Structures are given as structure tokens and as C-alpha cells.
Amino acid sequence: MINRSVVAGFGGQGVMMIGKMLCYASLDHGKHALFLPSYGTEQRGGTANCTVILSDEEIGSPMTAHIDTLIAMNEPSLKKFQGMVKPGGTVYINSSLVKPEDVREDVVCTAIPVDDLAHELGSTKVANIIMLSAYAAGTGMFTKEEVTETVLHKLASKPQFLEMNRKAVETGFEHAK
Amino acid sequence: MAKQFMKGTEAIAEAAVRGGCRFFAGYPITPQNEIPEYMSRRLPEVGGVFVQGESEVSSVSMLFGAAAVGTRCMTSSSSPGMSLKSEGVSALAAGQLPAVIVNVSRGGPGVGSIQAAQMDYFQVTRAMGHGGHRLIVYAPSTVQEAVDLTYKAFEKADEYQAPMLVCPDGSIGAMMEAVELPPFRDAERKRLTTYASQCINPDKLIISTFHYTAEHSEGFNRLLEEMYEGWKQNEVMVEEYETEDAEVVVCAYGIVGRVAKDAVKQLRAEGIKAGLIRPITLFPFCTKSFEKLDYGKLKGILVAELSIPAQMIEDVELATKGRVPLESLTHSGGRFIITEEVYDRLKAMALGNTKEVK
Amino acid sequence: MELLYTRPKTLIKPGSYYCPGCLHALAGKLIAEVIQEMGVQDDTLLIASVGCGGMFKRILDVDCASATHGRAAAAATGACRCAPEKLVFTYQGDGDLAAIGLAETLNAANRGENFVAILINNSTYGMTGGQMAPTTMIGQASTTTPGGRQAEREGYPMHMCEIIDQLTAPRFIARYSLDKPAEIRKAKAGIRHAFDIQRAHKGYSFVELMSNCPTNWGLSPLQSLEFMREKTLKEFPLGVFRDLEKEETL
């Protein structure tokens, strides 16, 4: 199995972290992973996006016309990248900012209001954790325990957010269903 | 040792440290800044030295001094910075000094684009600087290969007492993949021996890029010529994939080689006899790989590179000597060549819809 | 018989490749003597340069890395950082150090690199045939200022000791002249002092030696010394601009 994704949003939404965390989860659990960020001249603001490839096999080309999954954290990202999604592919949207009706009809749309859910958990900063957990659940690539393990391990330097991150993973898994 | 998930630039830096690099000098330029940043943290941990140079020219000249006292050393930059470094690279070659140069290449000419590209092919494969010197030029297509080739570049720099170049494009530099890091080599300083010592003061170590007599000057250039001819025999690295019976072949290096390989696999799965030649050393070039092709069957070669105008195609022309039509697939300055494009072009070529370039 | 003077063993026979009357050769002898007196011949790394300074590797019997034009300070940086046990010094002309190598010179000085920079100031590019240097005097003819250097067109002579004296890191900055015995003795003492600072790993020293170029000035050796006294030594005042060693001991 191979899953090619683009994760995109505003700078500051933790887009790169979603991509990297999915890669870490893959590597922690015996899969291959490739992370390719786009970079620009701006230091802050603007849009951010990255390509993430998770695979059971060794990864060949990172540059293809089509992707299996798009994670759109804001509206410009949906507009820019949804054309790349294969018919029948999946688009995860942050429905706090993106309208589900804007998503193409020939793809599966998983709409999760991650900003609102994160706010309820105590910090909008965990919106990205909720989103990557929803992706993990939706693709069936990782169990909740696997994602929790990776997330808590990688974010171990911030123990004060440990409980919030654990809840964010749970929230993501619940809403992906 | 467990694999580590690393960014290309940082993996190159760590491979250098493990390859014995104990001196790094560099100047900020996108997209390679993680290399000096990593080295500024890492080298002091292993007793090495990092210096941020006041310029590209100065940084590479610092290597001249570091290498002269036998320290393994490296500098890195990106395309516009390589033009500035060219003076110093020529001096390293002339001074018989081992050093590793990394060019995380971007678009050009001029300041060009900060996005990944492969537009320095002529510059790196012919002569970085004046005087016709050459470098072994390593072009990795994965982060693991970037690690392995950087490590190897240090070995070859020592072996030939000459500068070596590692030339990933910006996408390999920015990409993160799992890598297995090589073991630590010894990092002892070594005393060099040079041709200039023999000419000027045999009792002492003399590093000189200048020779005072015509006899010495020609003698030294003959020495370099012999070394470069030896590289052509012994240092060529290439990946040949499904080329034995190929009817269509794509030639591509670095990230594009990897993109093209997937296209070849897809075509083979459909019964189309496609093949890949991926030069791993850009110089010396894999001319012999083109000798092995079956020109009775071969319909065409597609040369795919992130450069407008195409550059590597000239080496393919030299290697194929007009025996087969060549086609060119190019993008540059941030747009990538994607698998589907290579697939479509090779398929059209295989089905006879080929249009000859030139 | 008592031996009063002998040729230092740190000088290569047959000796100078410089023009008759050129003070480069004298500078070479002074440095050779200092290296011999310090007993560091085998630990010395000369960073030579391009121009007449480049020929130094043919007269001093020490290890040498001969840098490209203007890059001696950068090469010395790499060498002294990696080989702290070595006596590292550069030997550069004014064109090399103050024109094409100004960025390298000032930034190495500003970092307080542990080497000695020796500048030979003879107000011209010698080896290339007498073109204008940053140190050429106002009114002085050169092959690129045939009617003499004009301030409004070419600017003024650059005073490197004074410029480097603006930086915080350098330990010792001094200008000496090689035109007469008393000054030559001071110059040798200054070179020794700078080398001692380097051996003690205390940082950067800058020693400027006022010199001549009879060939390109179009003067006899003796006339060239007169020209120095009447012209260049008036433009470039001699003396110790900074000596942090002395200040610390006071």
C-alpha cells in the first residue's frame, strides 16, 4: 500500500508538523516515509505545503501528477490542490475554515472542524494533531495507540501538553469515523 | 544502528562529520542553510571547527588553509554561490588539496530561482573554475544516496588529493527520508605530499597553485590529465535499469532519475521495453553505458533534466554519436518533471510517435 | 674568531629572487632570523600570496601554502583553526591585502584569528608592472595613473594600520620602515613580538612594513629610500598603534 498526500494550510497551522508526524508514525511502525516541504522566500505567513508519501514498499518517485489524499487546513489550500486528488481519493478539510460544498464531488470528503475541536480541548495549537489523527484513522494506516505513541514521544519535550495531545489524538480518531 | 529520519541537507552534514570532516566554512544561501547551521552545532561536539565566512570566496579559501594542514574539510553553497567559489575550487585542484564541496543546486542563471533545479551541469562537469580542472561530481537521487556519496567523496578527496563535488538539487536537500548513517572514520590530520614541493622545496610541504617554469607547469598539468583519465576508467558510477533489451531509454540524474525509474517500471508492467540510465557521477560520465545499448532495437533516448536549456543532453550526444534519435524533456526553476510526463514521452517514443530534437 | 653574523638557516640558498635594492628581500631575512631565533622552523606555516609576496616561498625554508590573490587571510584562518600548534603568518603586498583581499583581511582581523598578517607597503603592484595600488601616493605616477594618482579620481592612499585599529579584536598593530638600520631593528622586534603573541594563542597581529619598489618607481635603490623618507613615510606614520600585551602588563 502506498499513500501520496499533500498537506497544506496557512503558515502557523502546523502543516509541516502534520506531515512529519505521519512520517514518524510510519517509520516507528515499519513503513517507509518521505517528506518534501515546499519552501519560499517568506520567513513568516503565506501558505505552507508539503508532500507526504507513506508506503509499505520502498518509495520511488516523489513527483507525480496525482495524489491519494489532500489535507486542506484552509480554503486557498483546497482550491490550489484538490485538482491533484485522484477520483475516488480523499480530501480532509478543516471545516472550521473550509466549506464541505467546495470540495469536488468525485472524491470522499472528511470534514472535521479541527480549529473548533482544538479550541474546546484548550488550545487551537492541537488542531494539527486532531487532523493527522483523523487521517491515520481514515486511511487505516495506524491504530490510535500507534499514533498516540509517536505523538507523545515526539512531543515529549512539552509534558504540560501531554494530556491535551492525547485527547487530540482521541478526538481525531472519533471524528474520522 | 536504527535508521534516522533526516532532511537531505542535515544528512549530508552528518555524513561529512562521520567521513572525518573537522572543518567547515560557509556562507548563507538558500536552499542549503541547514548544512552550515548543522555544522555550527555539530562540529564542536567532535572537536571540529565551524567558521561562517564573510563571503563564498573567503569560505572556500579557508578550506585551502585547513586542507593544507591535513584537516578534512567541506564547504557548501548553492548555484550563485558556486560561481563565487569557483576561484577557490580551482585553487584547491591546483594546490592538490583534498576537500568536499556541496552544491545544493537551484535555478539560474544569475540569482535565478531559489527552487530546486539542475542548471549547473556544464559548470560542475566541465570546470568549476578556470584552468580546465575537473571534479568527480556525485549526484544523489535519495537522501540515503546523498549520505553515501558525501561519505565517499571524502574518501576520494583523500585518495586523489583533490576537491570533490556533491551535487544534489534543492529537492534532495529539503526532502526527509529514513537513512542509515555510516560509521565514524578517523579524523586525524595527515601530512600531504605535493608536486610543488618537489619543484620548489623538497624538504618542506609547499602548497602552490603556481609553477615557476614551463617544465613544471606542463608536468603538473600532465599529472592532472593522468588523474582525470584514471577517473574515467575507475570512478564512473551509474544505475542501469532494464537497459539490456530496451527499445526506449530515459537518461536522467538526481531527483529526475528517481522520478523516471517509476515511469520505466510502469511501462515494463505494460510490456513496453523501457530502460533507465541514471548517471550517479556526472563527471566522469557513464559513456560506456551507452555503448552497451542495443542500437538495433533502440528507438530513442529521452534525456530528462531540470534545466532549460538542456545541458546533459550534450554528453548523451557525445556518447551515442548520432546512433539514435534523442529527445529532451526539461523544466526548471521550481517546476518538477513528474513521472507521468516521462511515462507519456517514453510511451510515445516506443509507439513510434517520436519527434527528433535538433 | 668570534662569529658575529651568519646567514640564517631558515633562508633557502641561493637566496633572493627580488630585484636589486628591493626591501622584500630584507623583510625575508628579518622573518627568517626571527623564526630561527624562536626555534620554530619546523612548526611554521607561511601563507604566501600573489604578487611579489608570492615569491617568499622560494626564500624561506618553511612549509608554505600559497593562497590565491587576496585570500591569504582566509587560508590562514583555516590553517590556524585546524593547526593551533603552528606558527601561521601571512605575507602580502598592498594590492593583495588592501585591495582584492580587503574583505578577507578585515574579517579575519575582526574575528581575532590567531595568525600574524605582514603587509609589505610599497605603494604599487610590483610583479604586474607598477599599476596603482590602494597605497599609491597622491600624484605618484603608475602605469594605470600615468599622470599621477588624483584624489578626486582614484581616492586617497589607504592606511591599513589605522583601519584595523578600528576593530576590537586585534592584539597588536604596528607600522615599521625598512629604510634604515634603526628602523629595521625595530621592525624585527615588532615581528618577533607579533610571532610571540601568535605562539601564545592570543590572537591577531598586524605588522605593516614600509618598503620600496626601485624597479617600478623608476629610481635607483638609494633614490628609492629617499623617496620613502620624503613621501611615503610622511603619508604613513610609523609606530605601534595598539599593543594589548603592553597594556595588560602595565
Image: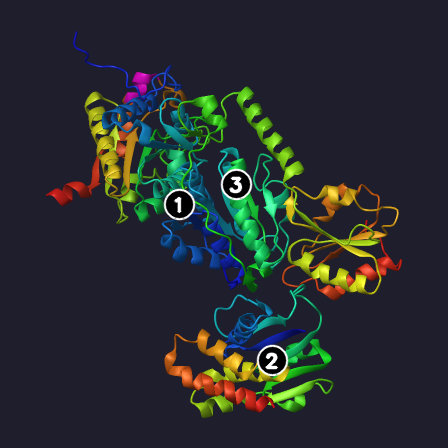
Whole-angstrom CA distance, mark 1 to mark 3, is: 29 Å
Residue denoted by label 1:
C103
Q: Can residue C211 be seen in this view?
A: yes
Residue at the image point whose x is 63% and y is 37% from the top: B231
Q: Give the number of the disc on residue A71.
A: 2
* In the displayed structure image, the side of residue B324 where residue B21 appears, left or right: left
Magenta-colored segment: predominant secondary structure: helix
Q: Which residue is drawn at 15% across and 41% down?
A: C246
Q: Is residue B72 left or right of residue C240?
A: right
Can you say whether B291 is above or below B145 in the image? above
Q: In which quarter of the image is residue C18?
A: top left
| Range of magenta residues | C220-225
Marks 2 and 1, how far apart in space?
A: 49 Å
**Kind of residue at disc 2:** Ile
Q: Do callouts 3 and 2 point to residues on the same chain?
A: no
Q: In this view, does B148 lie above or below B205?
A: below
**Visible in this render: residue A96?**
no
Same chain assignment for discs 1 and 3: no
